Amino acid sequence: MTKKWFDKMMALAVVGLASSAVWWTWATPSVQLQSMTTNPPAQTKAMGVSVELTRVVTTQLRDEAQATGSLRARQSVMLRPELAGRVSALGFRDGSPVRQGQVLVQLDDALQQADVAQAAAQVSVAQASFKRNQDLVAANFVAQQALDTSAASLQVARAQLDLARVRLSRMAIRAPFDGVVGMRLVNVGDYVKDGTDLVNLEDSRQMVVDYRLPERFGDRLAVGQTVELTLDALPGRPLQATVDAIDPLQDSNGRSILVRAVLPNTGRTGQANRTPALRSGMFARTTTVFATHEAALMVPEQAIVPQDGRQFVIMAVASVRPGTALVSRRQQVSLGVRRQGMVQISEGLSAGDTVVVAGQQRLQSDGTPLRAVAVGPLDKASAP
């Protein structure tokens, strides 16, 4: 009896200890959590959303557009004959300068000279007939109609002489302007037809470059704007040109506008100087400068948060609550020019403001405490 009572007492004691242990296990965390919520430690107050920050800085920024084109001489022509004939003489050396009016290619003109002589003789006969009829009409020996007929014949003879002289002049191909000839494509003795290529002539005192820009730049283009050129053939030698003309017809296929810029050629071919000559056909990279901003506000592109067709940034501002240094604030901005991973802020920010560049997706409302885990200085970014 005593043994059974002792066993029951021991069983009740074990059950009571087990129940006490279970209650302590569940009750203690709740009490601790309530205590932390009521009196949070200083370290918990200092915690916030981890973000990366950077500052808004000012820098010189150019509003520009880039394109590619090819250089060519301001005046360039391929000389071709208007009449067929055999080349009798060449009046130039390959690659040499020539003057306006200089005979470059002479075709055999013996037949044309004979035509001129024949036409001149016919004019002499028509003049003599006209003179004789004038005398006869004055003496009333012939009718006025005979004088009119001889006058018309004289005019026809003179027109035939003018035509023969023009044909004779077309047998000599002259330089239409001062320039430098290229390599001859014919030799003395060659028979050429009308329209055959003879030699090219270029006036390279001024060069032009034609290039195309997208239609969105149409209202910003103007004659006289500065165009910077870099040539692959002349590395490290930047050049400056000026917009000379803008094509009023826009290309409907590529939606682009043709622009022509001119620049002087200080090292012209055929000139004795050490300045490299600009040649037609050189590949050129153009940069059209629309405006220059001396103090443009720039931030990295990743700082921009688009929403509902508007652009925002998340600013990091000082907190008014004790224990929190920085909090978030959404700010709408207006964007300007983009350059190499950076974007201009035209409205909404000031120089020195701090913005979030990473972690914006975790900032759902203004006033969220921030903890900067990294600060991205602009000197390590791709500043323009």
Image (cartoon, rainbow, N blue to C red):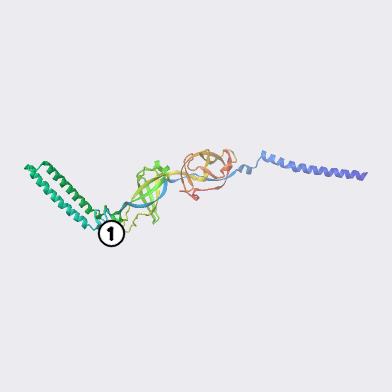
Location of mark 1 (residue): 191
Q: Residue furthest front?
A: 142
Asked if 69 appears above or below 326 in the picture, the reply is below
Q: In this view, does 91 lie to the left or right of 366?
A: left
| Quarter in which the N terminus is drawn | top right
Tell me the amino acid under the disc marked 1.
Tyr
Kindly identify the residue that appears in the image at 16 percent across and 52 percent down. Answer: 120
* Closest to the observer, 39 or 54: 54
Visible in this render: residue 11? Answer: yes
Q: Residue shown at 25%/55% (left/top)?
A: 173
Residue furthest to the right: 1
Badge 1: residue crowd in 10 Å (few <14, some 14–19, many ≥20):
some
Residue 361 picture quarter = top right
| Position of residue 328 measured from the top left corner of the image (x, y, whole percent) | 56, 40
Q: Is residue 337 left or right of residue 89?
A: right
x and y percent of residue 50 in the render? 58, 45
Residue 233: quarter of image = bottom left
Where's residue 338, x and y in %? Answer: 46, 45
* Percent position of residue 117, x then y: 17, 54
| Residue at the (21%, 55%) spot, across then down | 112
Front residue of this view, candidates 71 and 90: 90
Give whichever of 56, 114 is nearer the camera: 114
The foreground one among 342 and 8 is: 342
Q: Is residue 116 left or right of residue 44?
A: left
Q: Is mark 1 on a helix, strand or loop?
A: strand
